[in-house]
């Protein structure tokens, strides 16, 4: 079992302390974990620390028995695939080009038949084949976000970190995209962590939740456990209740007081 | 994946479209090369002496068939100028393309960072004060001064980025500060200069290919042959950078290091070009824009075509500078904008897609 775990992570932006000795319990592969927490809780920062794009002052991230700090940046980023938060690029690059770029991951510019078929198949499976020859500067917000997710999923990594992959998507595409991510993580036996704001989506798709707030991990466990904990109401500053939906799924309700 | 029978028809159609676009890109590059060769020949035949195009081509390919007069005109006078035009055009085109890429700014060109005004100031020191930064370079001291000052400016820029971090904003702002500093210093020198010196200075700044020699042409091509493959080898990283810094970093690009090293390369290209032929604006800005409109920003097509567009513009300029008034060779700096801008405006007006919004 190559679980992902972190202990004692301390990190500051300048003099502003973000994390003080933060750690989380091992995240099992093959399951989808949702990272939830209010704005500015440090979700993106935690992702960047795991990916190695930011260096912690102290603490370690382990993948199985490997201390990720012992890897070179390049190798680490090959094993840990991080999709940054929603972006719009103004580049004159086609969707096929940018997905090819993610697929090759800077490994030179010889593109062979297998590479091209891999990219074509990925675009078709993601349902964005019709955008293949469009420039990324012409895409709508939702379309660019789907391209971003495709760029992440075409890579073969051990850990996938998605920073709010559904923030610009309509209902159907939210379900589509999270379904794709969940299926890919299960198929590949990879570790998948998704930062989400929508607690209902988190409850529906995630096998586990991690609640981040005030620079600490406040709760970690199954959606039912975490969503019913007192910590979640306190962190978000709203009263949170759960109930069963028409298809026996967990539904989250928030009340202003 | 390798078993093509499992691949769906839609995926194959996407692959075909991609291949077609790739083929188109290669064809365009070859077409531009052909066009460039044609312009070089026309450039050589243009001017007094009534050379025919076929005779010119014959003499270029076989120097031994030339009469003494043809040898002097074609091989000693016009070929260095024509080759200098395309070398400098390509250098400025490449420098502009990479500048726009690393600074994420459509208005960036080799001169944005104050390189040309620094070079202008260096040249002015030589012309007005007769002062050579590196002693013992003889008649080349105007070029050498210009080069040294342009490179010093980019060194200063490096130091600033070490203090403030390698962000495009910091680089552009410091560059603009450089630009104004050197312009002010240049004004000081101009104010104190004699009339003859002033005329010389202005002539230098307008840019001229007439100073081309085989030695200078060799240096320019050597630097191009050094830098182009190196930029091409970084083409994935540079393309990735256009997707945003975050994305590029997540793919494993060391963004800060890439910016700094590419800046060094760009500075070298621009400084050599400017010191040999004077400040030629516009080519470094527009060449890459034309390339972008035609093939997009995948560096594998963008970079060679930017170089070729720059070369084409300057080759065209060189012809125009001789053809406008027979017997007079106008400074090319004046002509680049005049012939480039109408073409550029046409491209913008005919452009369906908008980038850099």
Image (cartoon, rainbow, N blue to C red):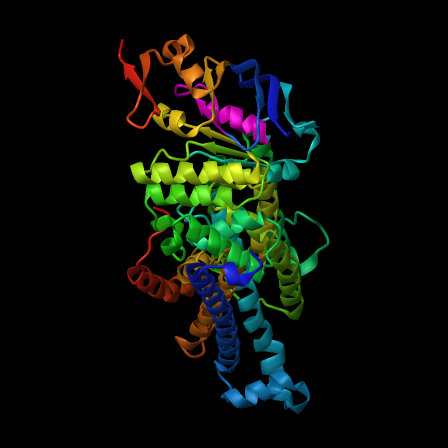
Q: How many marks?
A: 0
**Residue B63 pos. (x, y %):** 66, 85
**Residue B154 pos. (x, y %):** 58, 43
Nearest the camera: A152 or A179?
A179
**Residue B173 pos. (x, y %):** 46, 36
Based on the picture, tell me whether residue B147 belongs to the magenta stretch. no
**Residue B221 pos. (x, y %):** 63, 64
In the image as oriented, which residue stretches furthest toward the left?
A256
**Residue positioned 58% across, 38% down in the render:** B256
Based on the picture, tell me whether residue A50 belongs to the magenta stretch. yes
Can residue A48 be seen in this snapshot?
A: yes
Q: Is residue A130 above or below residue B210?
A: above
Q: Is residue A251 left or right of residue A213?
A: left
Q: Quadrant of the N terminus of chain B?
A: bottom right
Magenta range is A32-51
Q: Is residue A182 above or below residue A132?
A: above
Indicate the quadrant where residue B343 lies: bottom left
Indicate the quadrant where residue B259 lies: top right
Q: Is residue B317 left or right of residue A167?
A: right
Nearest the camera: A209 or B304?
A209
Can residue B124 be seen in this snapshot?
A: no
Q: Is residue B168 left or right of residue B127?
A: left
Nearest the camera: B90 or B59?
B90
**Residue positioned 56% across, 77% down in the render:** B78
Q: Is residue B165 above or below residue B280?
A: above
């Amino acid at each position: 079992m190559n679980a992902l775990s972190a202990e004692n992570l301390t990190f500051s932006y300048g003099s502003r302390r973000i994390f003080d000795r933060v750690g989380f319990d091992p995240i099992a592969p093959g399951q989808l974990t949702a990272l939830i927490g209010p704005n500015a809780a440090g979700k993106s920062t935690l992702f960047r620390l795991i990916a190695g794009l930011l260096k912690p002052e102290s603490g370690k991230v382990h993948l199985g028995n490997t201390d990720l700090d012992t890897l070179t940046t390049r190798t680490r980023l090959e094993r840990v695939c991080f999709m940054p938060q929603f972006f719009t690029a103004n580049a004159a690059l086609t969707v096929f080009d940018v997905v090819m770029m993610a697929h090759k991951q800077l490994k030179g510019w010889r593109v062979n038949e297998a590479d091209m078929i891999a990219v074509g198949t990925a675009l078709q499976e993601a349902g964005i084949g019709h955008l293949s020859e469009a420039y990324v500067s012409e895409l709508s917000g939702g379309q660019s976000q789907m391209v971003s997710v495709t760029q992440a999923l075409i890579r073969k990594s051990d850990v996938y970190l998605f920073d709010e992959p559904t923030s610009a998507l309509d209902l159907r595409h939210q379900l589509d995209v999270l379904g794709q991510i969940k299926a890919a993580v299960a198929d590949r036996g990879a570790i998948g962590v998704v930062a989400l704001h929508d607690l209902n989506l988190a409850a529906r798709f995630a096998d586990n939740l991690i609640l981040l707030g005030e620079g600490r991990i406040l709760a970690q466990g199954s959606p039912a456990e975490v969503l019913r904990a007192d910590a979640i109401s306190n962190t978000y500053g709203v009263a949170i209740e759960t109930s069963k939906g028409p298809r026996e799924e967990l539904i989250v309700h928030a009340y202003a007081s | 994946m390798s078993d093509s029978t499992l691949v769906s028809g839609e995926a194959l159609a996407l692959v075909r479209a991609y291949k077609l676009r790739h083929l188109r890109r290669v064809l365009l590059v070859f077409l531009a090369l052909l066009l460039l060769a044609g312009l070089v020949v026309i450039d050589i035949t243009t001017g007094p002496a009534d050379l025919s195009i076929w005779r010119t081509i014959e003499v270029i390919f076989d120097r031994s068939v030339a009469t003494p007069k043809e040898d002097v005109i074609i091989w000693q006078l016009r070929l260095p100028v024509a080759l200098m035009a395309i070398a400098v055009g390509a250098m400025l085109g490449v420098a502009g393309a990479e500048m726009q890429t690393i600074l994420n700014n459509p208005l960036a060109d080799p001169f944005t960072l104050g390189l040309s005004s620094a070079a202008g100031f260096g040249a002015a020191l030589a012309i007005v004060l007769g002062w050579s930064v590196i002693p013992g370079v003889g008649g080349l001291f105007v070029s050498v001064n210009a080069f040294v000052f342009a490179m010093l400016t980019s060194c200063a820029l490096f130091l600033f980025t070490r203090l403030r971090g390698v962000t495009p904003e910091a680089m552009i702002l410091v560059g603009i500060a450089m630009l104004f500093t050197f312009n002010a210093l240049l004004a000081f020198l101009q104010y104190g200069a004699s009339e003859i010196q002033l005329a010389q200075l202005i002539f230098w700044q307008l840019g001229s290919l007439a100073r081309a020699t085989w030695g200078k042409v060799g240096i320019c091509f050597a630097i191009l042959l050094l830098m182009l493959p190196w930029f091409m080898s970084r083409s994935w990283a540079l393309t990735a950078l256009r997707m945003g810094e975050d994305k590029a970093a997540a793919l494993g690009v060391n963004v800060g290091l890439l910016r700094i090293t590419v800046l060094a390369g760009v500075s070298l290209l621009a400084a050599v070009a400017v010191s040999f032929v004077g400040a030629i604006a516009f080519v470094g800005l527009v060449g890459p824009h034309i390339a972008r409109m035609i093939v997009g920003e995948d560096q594998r097509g963008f970079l060679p075509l930017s170089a070729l567009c720059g070369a084409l513009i300057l080759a065209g300029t060189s012809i125009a500078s001789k053809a406008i008034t027979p017997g007079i060779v106008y400074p090319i700096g004046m002509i680049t904008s005049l012939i480039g801008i109408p073409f550029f405006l046409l491209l913008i007006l005919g452009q369906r897609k908008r980038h850099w919004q």
